[in-house]
Amino acid sequence: MNGEPNNLNSNHLTSIKMVSAMYNKEIQTGSSQKILVVEDNQDNRELVVKVLKINGYKTIEAVDGEEALEKTKTEKPDLILMDLFIPKIDGYEVTRRLKSDRDLKHIPVIALTAHAMKGDMEVALAAGCDGYMPKPIDVRELPKQIEYFMNTHGLSATTKDEGS
C-alpha cells in the first residue's frame, strides 16, 4: 500500500451496508456522466464506485498514477476523483500532467484524501485540483458533491434526453 491509513472502519461498514441496500432497491438518477475513480485502496475504491453506479454514473477505475494517466487519455472521463497518495506517480503529479495537457486540462479533478491536515487543500488546489473531498467519504453526500462539481463545470449530472 501507500502508507495511507486503511479507512475501512465501522462507519465504512455501515456505509457499505447502506449502499448495498440502496443498490438492491435499484436507486438510479439516470445520469450518463463518466467518472474516473483513482484509488489504490480496494475497499475505498469499491465503496466510491458502488455509490456512483447506484446514482447512475458510469465509472472507470485506476489504482495508480500511470493507469490514471492512460485511462484519462483513452476514456476521456467527465470528472476524475483522485486519491493524492497513490503508487507510481502520486495524485499531485498526475493532476499537474493532466492540467498541462491541452486535450485533458478541461476535465475537473477532485482530490480525495485521508490526509486532511491544515494546508492540504491548498496544496491540492495549487497542483491543479478543482476541488477537495476528505475521507472517509460520506455516501449520502457524495452524489450531491459530484452533482455540484459537474454543475460548476458545465456538466449537468442530471440532464436527461428531453427530446424523446
Image: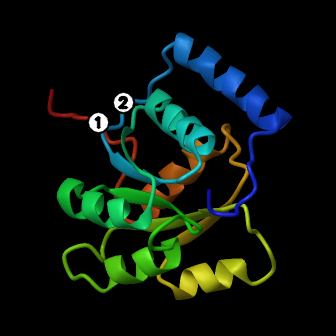
Instruction: Choose the circle earlier in sequence order: 2 or 1.
Output: 2
Instruction: Judge the density around disc 1: few (<14), some (14-19), many (≥20) Cα neighbours within 10 Å.
Output: few
Is residue 130 visible in this depiction of the protein? no
Name which residue lies at 62% across and 25% down: 19
Drawn side of residue 6 relative to residue 2, left or right = right
Total marks shown come to: 2
Q: Position of residue 114 (x, y in %)?
A: 72, 61
Q: Position of residue 80 (x, y in %)?
A: 42, 59
Q: Choose between 45 and 24: the one closer to the eye.
A: 45
At label 2, the amino acid type is Gly
Instruction: Estimate the x, y position of residue 24 in percent, counting from the top left.
Output: 54, 11
Specify the farthest residue to the left: 163
Q: Residue at x 45, y 24 (%)?
A: 28
Tell me if residue 143 comes above or below residue 66 in the rendering: above
Furthest residue toward right:
10
| Foreground: disc 2 or disc 1 | 2
* Quadrant in the picture for residue 31: top left
- The three-letter code of the residue at mark 1 reads Lys
Q: Which residue is mark 2?
A: 30
Residue 70, picture quadrant: bottom left
**Looking at the rendered structure, which numbered label has been put on residue 160?**
1
Image check: 61 left or right of 32?
right
Q: Is residue 62 visible?
A: yes
Q: Secondary structure at mark 1?
A: loop
Q: Secondary structure at mark 2?
A: loop
Side of 51 relative to 8 (left or right): left
* Cα separation between marks 2 and 1: 7 Å
Mark 2 surroundings within 10 Å by alpha-carbon count, few (fewer than 14), some (14 through 19), many (20 or more) = some
Contact between labelled residues 1 and 2, with CB atoms less than 8 Å apart: yes
Q: Which residue occupies 48% across, 15% down? A: 26
Which numbered tag is attached to residue 15? none
